[in-house]
Image (cartoon, helix red, strand yellow):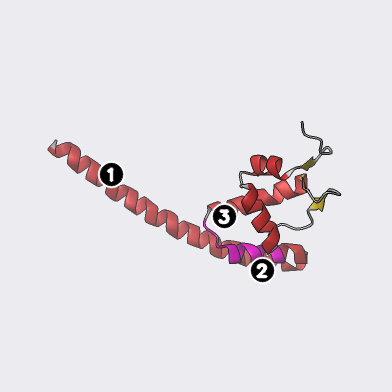
Amino acid sequence: MDTTAAGTYTIGECARRSGFTMDTLRYYERIGLIGDIARTPTGQRRFSDEHLEWLGVLKCLRDTGMPVEQMHRFATLAREGDHTIPERIALLEAHKTAVDARMDDLAAKRDYLLGKIDYYRSVS
């Protein structure tokens, strides 16, 4: 039975909702990607809806291949306030360019595989 207050989540519940492992959540907290996590009197973490929203951002960045160092830079800029928005935009634009390049490379490799499949079907 979950005895957490409404809008707060244990690390297990946060892991389930975010798609990250508990180990990853602890690591992200330790390196400063996630901050301001409340603790119970016994030291158990309590994540909030805001944490889950932020973890959604981090998941997108991670899943698209952004290195942890860049994710950390993005998190630092976000914490520093709105005056860092231009730098955050630049960081995200550079990441998008890298994602686009990887997608183009994968599309070319997929086309190559399709050609091989067609060839092998034609000789079988």
Read off the magenta span: 65-76
Element under label 3?
A: helix
**Which residue is painted at 58% across and 55% down in the image?**
61
- Would you call the spot at circle 3 few (<14 residues within 10 Å), some (14-19), or many (20 or more)? some
Question: Considering the image in quadrants, where does the C terminus appear?
Answer: top left
Q: Is residue 83 visible?
A: yes
Where does residue 27 sit, x and y in percent of width and height? 65, 57
Q: Quadrant of residue 121?
A: top left
Q: Which residue is mark 2?
A: 87
Marking on residue 114: 1
Q: Residue furthest front?
A: 42
Amino acid at pointer 2: Glu
Question: Considering the image in quadrants, where does the N terminus appear?
Answer: top right
Closer to viewer: mark 1 or mark 3: 3
Marking on residue 62: 3
Between 46 and 57, the residue placed more toward the observer is 46
State how far apart marks 1 and 3 are (Cα): 29 Å
Where does residue 41 sit, x and y in percent of width and height? 86, 49
- Would you call the spot at circle 2 few (<14 residues within 10 Å), some (14-19), or many (20 or more)? some
Q: Where 72 sits versus 16, above or below?
A: below
- Would you call the spot at circle 1 few (<14 residues within 10 Å), some (14-19), or many (20 or more)? few
Q: Is residue 57 visible?
A: no
Element under label 2?
A: helix
Instruction: Determine if the magenta segment contains residue 116.
Output: no
Amino acid at pointer 3: Arg
**Which residue is painted at 66% across and 68% down in the image?**
87
